[in-house]
Image (cartoon, grey):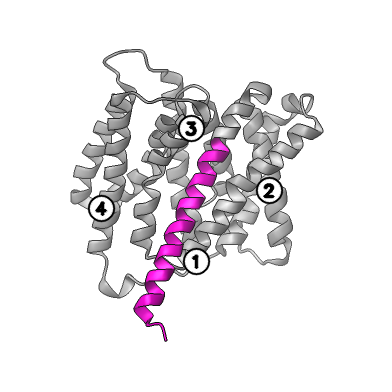
Amino acid sequence: MPSSSTHHFSGARSGTAMAGAAMCCVQLGLAASVGLADRLGSDGVAWLRLAWAALILVAFTRPWRSRFSRRGLVTSILLGLVTAGMTLMFMAAAVRIPLGTASALEFLGPLSVAVIRGGKAGRWWALLAAAGVAALTEPWHGGTDVTGVVLALGAAACWAGYILLTQRAGDEVNGLQALAVSMPVAALATTVFVGPAVAAHLDWQLLLVGAGLALLMPVVPFSLELLALRRLKASAFGTLMSLEPAIAVAIGFLVLGQLPGLSAVLGIVLVVAAGIGVTLQAEREKPADSSAVNDGGPETVERAAVR
């Protein structure tokens, strides 16, 4: 009969595979979105993806059957607004700068939240991340697309806001139900600014492509990350997710032909290292009885399905 340690190892291995698959889905979806931007524009692709994601999630979760407190509903609406901002700004950044660079800059959002919570010790990881940003943007050359960098940093700010709002909603709204409200709000908010201009360019082929993109982001990654969080410690999951900018570089090269320079590679390595470092530091400082495997509760929405 297999021992409990064997089961734990098998669960950790499958959880790692699920987390990796989720990150690959996200980056493949982003790469496909960049390719589609030539036909719809970056904002049109963002709108199409959010609209389909909202339809799928509403059909799956049926939020009208749930009861929301006023605070929970307001927080879920705010989540939708920052999701719209994050999606629009990241897509606009990704068509201007390489996918790996955009993903690394956007990752500064959750990294900043973790660093601030890390107190004085977090300052060293902040310095490492700042060095990574300098290597990514190379301000001394003056050839970086400043607009793309600013948009990616705007997406990072929205991601940080999403994390804080999700935690605020954690006691009021179940994670899936919060997403079932926030995603339609994001789609509606994006429709106000983008929908009318994009509608004239849509056809059945583009609508089907949009449905596929919505499955790649957020439906499949969200499901995989929920499953992974039930098999991994939160620290292990956070460490794995810190590798996402590196995966973005690989996908950008394989799918979009974006070959990063040495400075960009160095910058991404530094940002990834800062993410791993601050995650492991938080685990060391956590009380021993709180290091159990994550149960996939409301806090899981922080990393999953927001881009």
Residue marked by disc 3? 254
For residue 151, above or below residue 12: above
Residue type beneath disc 3: Leu
Task: Kindly indicate whether the residue at mark 1 contacts the one at mark 3 (C-beta within 8 angstroms).
Answer: no
Q: Which residue is mark 1?
A: 297
Q: How many marks?
A: 4
In 3D space, how far apart are the residues under numbered discs 3 and 1 (Cα atoms)? 35 Å
Residue 8, x across and y down, in percent: 38, 73
The image shows residue 213, relative to residue 19, as above or below, that is above
The answer to whether one can see residue 79 in this image is yes
Residue 22 painted magenta? yes
Name the image quarter holding the C terminus. Answer: top right
**Which of the labelled discs sits on residue 54, or is there none?**
2
Give the mark, 3 or 2, whose residue is nearer the N terminus: 2
Instruction: Describe the element under mark 4 as helix, strand or loop.
Output: loop
In the displayed structure image, the side of residue 292 where residue 170 appears, left or right: right
Quadrant of the image occupied by residue 129: top left
Disc 4: which residue: 118
Alpha carbon distance from label 3 to label 2:
29 Å
Q: State the separation of the CA atoms marked 3 and 4.
A: 36 Å
Q: Which residues are magenta?
A: 1-30
Q: Give the quarter of the image for residue 58.
A: bottom right
Q: Looking at the picture, which amino acid does disc 1 mark?
A: Gly
- Distance from label 4 to label 1 (Cα)? 22 Å
Label 2, secondary structure: give it: helix
Front: mark 3 or 1: 3
- Where, quadrant-wise, is the N terminus in this rendering? bottom left
What residue do we see at 59% from left, 34% from top?
Answer: 32
Q: Earlier in the sequence, mark 1 or mark 2?
A: 2
